[in-house]
């Protein structure tokens, strides 16, 4: 069942997930919490970052760790540490705060946008436990917005070209498929979250788009 939050189908900007936890805004309705829990088979953690509900923009996470921006408040960071067990948690002191737009990762490999300061690449690598490469996609820096990746596949925006598709296939070692979300939106991450157990999508997503997500991400 596709969902809507805050009156929009752009659910991906408000949520983040790995295979164990999903981060969801504090005032999210209980029916959405339940849907995310049941679909992704995760424990829901409700919080804010920098007093904002934009968790999907401000959080990068996989099964090894979580990265958050420097705008996170001390009490929010404390809550995150209490809630996420043994997961690595690090604050990325970059001048960029919408870090999920700039990093594309699964549990083994990841791409980092060239605009992220080089001195923080090792922090990203160590905290998330992945092999990294610094690269844009089709000359665009918002690589985390253009695709969704899990350990089975990469769903990529139609804005990419064949060279990008080939690179992503070789780098991640996974199937790569082109798709959209919410009736043709190419910024795929804005309208969905996914882990290795399932995907939650915005309620404007078409049946064809959902079939494509299942085909690519398993």
Image: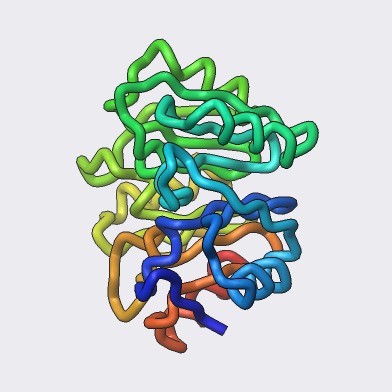
Left or right of 71 in this view: 129: right
Q: Nearer the viewer, residue 128 or 8?
A: 8
Given the current orientation, which residue lies at the most extreme right position? 86
Left or right of 2 in this view: 205: left
Left or right of 64 in this view: 118: left
x 55%, y 56%: residue: 26
Q: x%, y% of residue 70?
A: 42, 25
Q: x%, y% of residue 13?
A: 40, 56
x 54%, y 52%: residue: 16
Q: x%, y% of residue 152?
A: 63, 57
| Residue 113 placement: quadrant | top left
Q: Nearer the viewer, residue 168 or 157?
A: 157
Given the current orientation, which residue lies at the most extreme left position? 139
Quadrant where the N terminus sits is bottom right
| Residue 118 placement: quadrant | top left
x 68%, y 73%: residue: 34
User: Is residue 178 positioned above or below 31 on the image?
Assistant: above
x 43%, y 37%: residue: 50
User: Is residue 93 positioned above or below 18 on the image?
Assistant: above
Residue 151 in sight in this render: no
Residue 106 in sight in this render: yes
Q: x%, y% of residue 201?
A: 49, 72
Quadrant where the C terminus sits is bottom right
């Amino acid at each position: 069942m596709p969902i809507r939050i805050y009156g929009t189908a752009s659910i991906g900007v408000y949520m983040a997930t790995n295979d164990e936890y999903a981060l969801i805004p504090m005032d999210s309705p209980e029916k959405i919490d339940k849907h995310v829990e049941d679909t992704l088979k995760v424990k829901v953690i409700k919080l804010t970052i920098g007093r904002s509900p934009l968790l999907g923009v401000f959080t990068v996470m996989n099964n090894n760790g979580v990265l958050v921006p420097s705008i996170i408040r001390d009490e929010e960071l404390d809550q995150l540490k209490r809630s996420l067990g043994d997961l690595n948690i690090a604050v990325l002191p970059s001048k960029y705060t919408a870090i999920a737009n700039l990093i594309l990762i699964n549990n083994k490999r990841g791409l980092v946008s060239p605009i992220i300061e080089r001195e923080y690449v090792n922090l990203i690598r160590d905290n998330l436990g992945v092999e990294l490469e610094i690269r844009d996609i089709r000359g665009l820096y918002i690589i985390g917005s253009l695709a969704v990746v899990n350990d089975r596949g990469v769903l990529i925006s139609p804005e990419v070209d064949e060279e990008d598709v080939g690179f992503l296939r070789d780098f991640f070692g996974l199937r790569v498929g082109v798709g959209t979300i919410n009736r043709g939106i190419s910024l795929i991450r804005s309208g969905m979250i996914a882990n290795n157990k399932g995907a939650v999508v915005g309620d404007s997503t078409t049946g064809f788009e959902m079939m494509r997500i299942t085909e690519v991400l398993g």
